[in-house]
Amino acid sequence: MAQSPEPGAGCIDLASFEKASAAIESGHSVLVLGEAGSGLDEFAIALYDHFAGACHCAIATYKGSGKKFFEAIAEQLDIPTEVTDDNGKTKALTMDALKEEIAQNVNEDTLLIFPEAKRLTTGIRYWLEDLIEAGVKVVCLAAANPGRDIFLGMLEIELELPSDRTIREVMESEAVRQGMALSQSRLAELQPLAGRNPMLAKKVIQRERLGIRQDVQHTQYVVIMPVLVAALFAFAVVRFVGLGTNNKSLYITGGVALVAAMALKQLGQVRGARKRLGQ
């Protein structure tokens, strides 16, 4: 088996990589989640390299052509993609024939990796469902769990966001690739523009190389809800003033402000569905 990625190599989340590897070795199919641009492709390649010596591996991305997709899988698994007829003529297998040929030649020692799971069509997913039932291990990578058919039965592993140090290393590497000599102070100024996304980190350096000045794409905003709630609670003091002075207007105003503050506090805790970059 190939060695695991070295610590700090690329943007691979080593903790998640070890979890995914352990799950695969135990015979489970895995769904790896992470923001677009957070290193999913590198993660998929690292898994392929890691298991290439231990089992039959194939990595493929669906790009609109089902036949090419299955041909890529078959070729990596050393499964024939052509057939010779009785007249000695060779012709390529149809897509359905490829699916059947692959299904007949895979087993529990087969690992299939799909870096962009969201692109998989319904037909491909149903085909994979049969393979998983036969013991084939499948790894899918996506920005969010599609929440249907085969994905519901997969073990879910979420990638951690890269550290600030990792983002700085990505920016330095991209600057070298672009032939730029950026000082540490300039890198520190540019880093907030990338947040904790390696893809944005590279784009920041590329824009710097071209002299493009744009607004920040990754903003860390300040939550002001606590300030608003505190201000409304302050108006509740008016209620007690009205109570002490027998002023019904102040009493009612203070009571309404207090109720409004409690309502806003509860509304501030509402969270919608989480959206990932690229979803």
Image: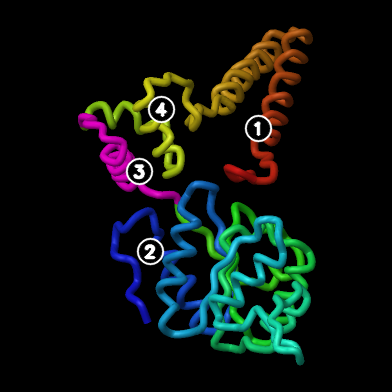
Determine if residue 133 is in view. Answer: no
- Checking the image for residue 7, the label placed there is none
Kind of element beneath mark 1: helix
CA distance separating discs 1 and 3 = 36 Å
Nearer the observer: mark 1 or 3; the answer is 3
Q: Give the range drawn in magenta.
A: 161-183
Amino acid carrying label 3: it is Ile
> Mark 3 to mark 4: distance in Å?
16 Å
Q: Earlier along the polypeptide chain: callout 3 or callout 4?
A: 3
Q: Residue at x 53, y 59 (%)?
A: 158
Q: Which of 207 and 225 is in front in this view?
A: 207
Q: Indicate the quadrant containing the N terminus: top left, top right, bottom left or bottom right.
A: bottom left
Q: Is residue 252 left or right of residue 9?
A: right
Label 2, on which residue?
Answer: 14
| Among the two numbered marks 2 and 1 on one chain, the one whose residue lies closer to the N terminus | 2
Give the residue at the far front of this rendering.
Answer: 87
Residue 73 on the magenta segment: no
> Which residue position is annotated with label 4?
207
Q: Name the residue under label 1.
A: 265
